[in-house]
């Protein structure tokens, strides 16, 4: 498959988690909603954007589900082995993509975020060519949303936990995915964090620890990550509305 790596993009989809917080009988990315797995909904949602042409799905070593999923033939998928932590799965995916396709840019999107929209992906990709991206000297971009609650930094004592002074809410946003970075830089940043034993929960954190800056694009509050049981009810509700084109 030839990929026009100037105007087309590859997406790493970390899907090797166990979904322990979900407390389900199978990993949450394989839970069935309206006849399709969460992972299928996520891949289908991403594939609505014409510039996303290759999906590299990182699954756990003993995954027995992925090859039973009937993805649409038009969607080009490579399946690789993920790792112990999310960052390891992303590192495996980016390393594989770099070796096989040498893409200039790479996107990373959680399998557990099935409500991503074509418009949000478009806004993220478009931001790379914006004056603001250039003027902020950013090297990549992420979707994120402003917080609705006041966030408290905590400290622990044996008697309980208490609050510490923290940043004002206006300066704190909730990161989502997709996150997009130059492939080589992201690969170097993830290797650096791995080598230094620095635990990161998203790609932007690795880039920041590696000395880079990340541009923020406001995403949709509906682009939640399936984490706990209550999230599944919301995802079912939104998917049902979209599939039945009810006004949101
Ligand atoms: N070793 C891991 C851990 C997580 N992920 C993926 O990273 C995404 C976000 O991670 P998270 O929501 O934490 O998923 P889990 O680790 O499965 O959830 P939990 O922490 O509740 O076990 C998910 O799509 C998950 O499949 C991964 O590819 N490899
Ligand atoms: C990448 C992410 O979805 C951004 O909010 C989040 O960090 C994933 O965290 P998790 O603990 O692996 O779910």
Image: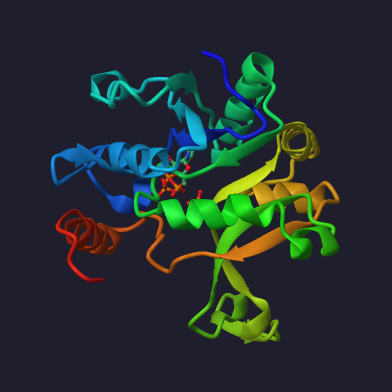
State the image quarter where residue 197 is shown. top right
Residue 82: give x, y in percent of width and height: 51, 27
Task: Examine the rendering and report whether any part of residue 243 can be seen.
Answer: yes
Residue 211: give x, y in percent of width and height: 86, 51
Q: Which residue is drawn at 58% across and 33% down?
A: 8
Task: Examine the rendering and report whether any part of residue 201 can be seen.
Answer: no
Figure check: 105 above or below 128? above
Position of 37 compared to 34: left or right? right
Q: How many labels does the image show?
A: 0
Q: Which residue is nearer to you in this view: 159 or 161?
A: 161
Figure check: 90 above or below 21? above
Residue 229: give x, y in percent of width and height: 26, 58
Residue 238: give x, y in percent of width and height: 24, 62
State the image quarter where residue 227 is shown. bottom left
Q: Residue at x 32, y 58 (%)?
A: 228
Position of 141 compared to 40: left or right? right
Q: Which residue is nearer to you in this view: 240 or 47?
A: 47
């Amino acid at each position: 498959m030839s990929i026009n790596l100037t105007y087309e993009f590859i997406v790493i989809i970390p899907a090797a988690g166990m979904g322990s917080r979900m407390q389900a009988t199978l990993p949450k990315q394989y839970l069935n909603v309206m006849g399709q797995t969460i992972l299928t909904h996520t891949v289908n949602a991403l594939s609505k954007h014409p510039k996303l042409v290759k999906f590299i799905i990182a699954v756990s070593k003993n995954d027995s589900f992925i090859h039973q999923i009937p993805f649409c033939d038009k969607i080009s998928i490579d399946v690789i082995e993920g790792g112990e932590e999310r960052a390891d799965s992303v590192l495996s995916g980016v390393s594989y993509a770099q070796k096989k396709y040498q893409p200039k840019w790479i996107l990373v999107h959680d399998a557990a975020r099935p409500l991503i929209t074509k418009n949000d992906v478009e806004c993220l990709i478009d931001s790379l060519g914006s004056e603001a991206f250039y003027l902020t000297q950013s090297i990549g971009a992420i979707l994120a949303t402003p917080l609705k609650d006041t966030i408290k930094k905590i400290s622990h004592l044996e008697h309980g936990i208490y609050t510490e002074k923290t940043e004002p809410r206006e300066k704190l946003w909730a990161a989502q995915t997709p996150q997009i970075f130059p492939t080589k830089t992201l690969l170097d940043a993830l290797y650096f964090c791995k080598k230094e034993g620095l635990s990161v929960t998203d790609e932007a954190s690795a880039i920041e620890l590696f000395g880079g800056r990340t541009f923020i694009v406001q995403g949709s509050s509906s682009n939640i990550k399936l984490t706990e049981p209550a999230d599944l009810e919301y995802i079912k509700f939104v998917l049902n509305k979209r599939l039945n084109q009810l006004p949101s």
